[in-house]
Amino acid sequence: MKIFVTIFAFYFSSPSYGQKNTIGYFKTTYFLNLTKAPKERIDTITITEHLDVHFYKKHFSVPYYIPGSFFDKRYKNTAIITWNDTIKKKNIQDNWTYTSTFDSLSRVTKYEYSGCLLCSQMPNQSTFFYDRQNRLVKIENRNDGPVGAKKSRQSNASTSKPKEEIDFKYDGENIIQIKKWSYKKLELQIEITNIKYANY
């Protein structure tokens, strides 16, 4: 019970930049080609929430495949399957599923998207890693399509190497830097470079 209290107290009670109605300046660096200089872009964003993974997905689409919540005390050591359209027939030909696997601390450690034939989306499997403070510090993404990863018959676990890795750097509870790697090569970096507090 103490573990749950620690997790949720950390997540919901910690102060955020957004509580002070701040403006954040974010620099995105694209490492498109090793023979060319990286390209940079500055985005100015009003911060009204924690700088968590959902903030970066909302504003930068990185990371893309993540669940709505990473903690759910109702589940532990189990996998929950959710159909995208609960009214349609449960058929992956024209519907698709999201599967969240929870560990003993009720954290989502794996998130699987079955794919969508109609919208030409390949299946995806995301694995999440946490630090001792229960902060998400790394995501590994794999495309486990029919021609892609082989499955172990004993563990039914993917044996493919991650095609994408995303690392998170924190300042307290806020993510201040994201690095996205594609097949071990740095693809982009997003970092907050300055904070400006609103004048009253």
Image (tube, grey):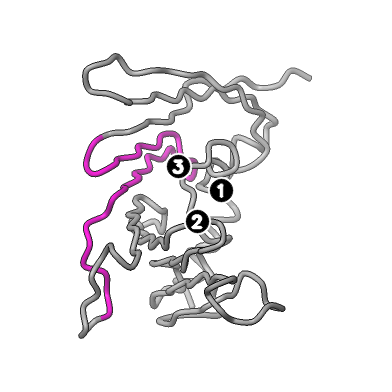
x, y percent for residue 119: 55, 57
Residue 172, numbered circle? 3
| Furthest-right residue in this view | 200
Q: Quadrant of the C terminus?
A: top right
Pointer 3 or 1: first along the chain: 1
Q: Which residues are magenta?
A: 156-185
Q: Main secondary structure of the magenta part?
A: strand
Task: Tell which of 159 and 95 is nearer to you.
Answer: 95
Compared across the picture, whether 24 is left or right of 33 comes to right
- Mark 3–mark 1 Cα distance, whole angstroms, equals 16 Å
Residue 120, numbered circle? 2
| Furthest-top residue in this view | 37
Q: Which residue is mark 1?
A: 54
* Residue at x-position 43% and y-position 37%: 171
- Residue 160 within the magenta-colored segment of the rendering: yes
- Residue 11 within the magenta-colored segment of the rendering: no
Q: Would you call the spot at circle 1 few (<14 residues within 10 Å), some (14-19), or many (20 or more)?
A: some
Q: Amino acid at mark 3?
A: Gly
